[in-house]
Structures are given as C-alpha cells and as structure tokens.
Image (cartoon, grey):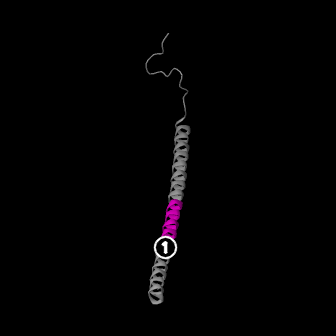
Amino acid sequence: MPPQRGTPSTVLPVPWEDHRQLLRTFRTRITARVVALSAAAAVLLGLALVVLIVAVGGQRDAARTAFRSQQALSVANELEKSLISIEN
C-alpha cells in the first residue's frame, strides 16, 4: 500500500532545534573550509608573487652584468685597435 499524502514514509521526524543545530554545524563546516581554502590560495599567490619579484631582480642584475661586460669588451677592443695602430 503506497503512503498517503501528507505522511512521511521513510523520513524520521527531527525536532526543530536539532534541525537548526545540524544546519548551523553544516554551515560552520562549509564556512571553515571556504576560509581555509581561500587562505591557502592567498598564501600560494603571495609565494608566487615573491618568486616572480625575486626572479625579475635576478634578471635585472644579470642584464647589468652583461651590459658592463659588453662595455669592457668594447673598451678593450678600442684599446687593442689603438695599440695596433701605434705599433704600425
């Protein structure tokens, strides 16, 4: 015989206070998880930003060193040309 309308067939009655407590606990757990995941994502993004800043600083230092080396080679080449012209 099918259950009649208005009567729950398999749902156990839950007192209203227990239901509210269950919802509050469920909301608290979801909120805690969302906050924890958001904090983890923020930390990861912060670390990525720090790594990028350090990498850009390293590239800038390498570019300065390369430019100084190029200048030194250019000056050495000019000195060599001057020395060759003086010897001739």
Give whichever of 19, 51 is nearer the camera: 51
Give whichever of 42, 87 is nearer the camera: 87
Does 29 sit above or below residue 85?
A: above
Q: Residue 78 vs residue 51: left or right?
A: left
Q: Residue at x 55, y 32 (%)?
A: 14
Magenta stretch encompasses residue 28? no
Give whichever of 70, 65 is nearer the camera: 70
Q: Find disc 1 in the rendering and name its residue.
A: 66
Magenta stretch encompasses residue 56? yes
Q: Mark 1: which amino acid?
A: Ala
In percent of width and height, residue 81 lies at 45, 83
| Residue furthest bottom in the image | 86
Which SS does the magenta portion mostly show?
A: helix
Does 11 sit above or below residue 70?
A: above
Does 4 sit above or below residue 42?
A: above
Q: Residue at x 53, y 63 (%)?
A: 51
- Locate the C terminus by quadrant: bottom left
In percent of width and height, residue 54 lies at 52, 67
In percent of width and height, residue 56 lies at 48, 67
Give whichever of 84, 38 is nearer the camera: 84
In percent of width and height, residue 58 lies at 52, 69
Q: Residues within 10 Å of mark 1 (few under 14, many from 20)?
A: few
Circle 1: element type: helix
The image quadrant that residue 4 belongs to is top left
The image quadrant that residue 25 belongs to is top right
- Tell me the magenta residue range: 46-63
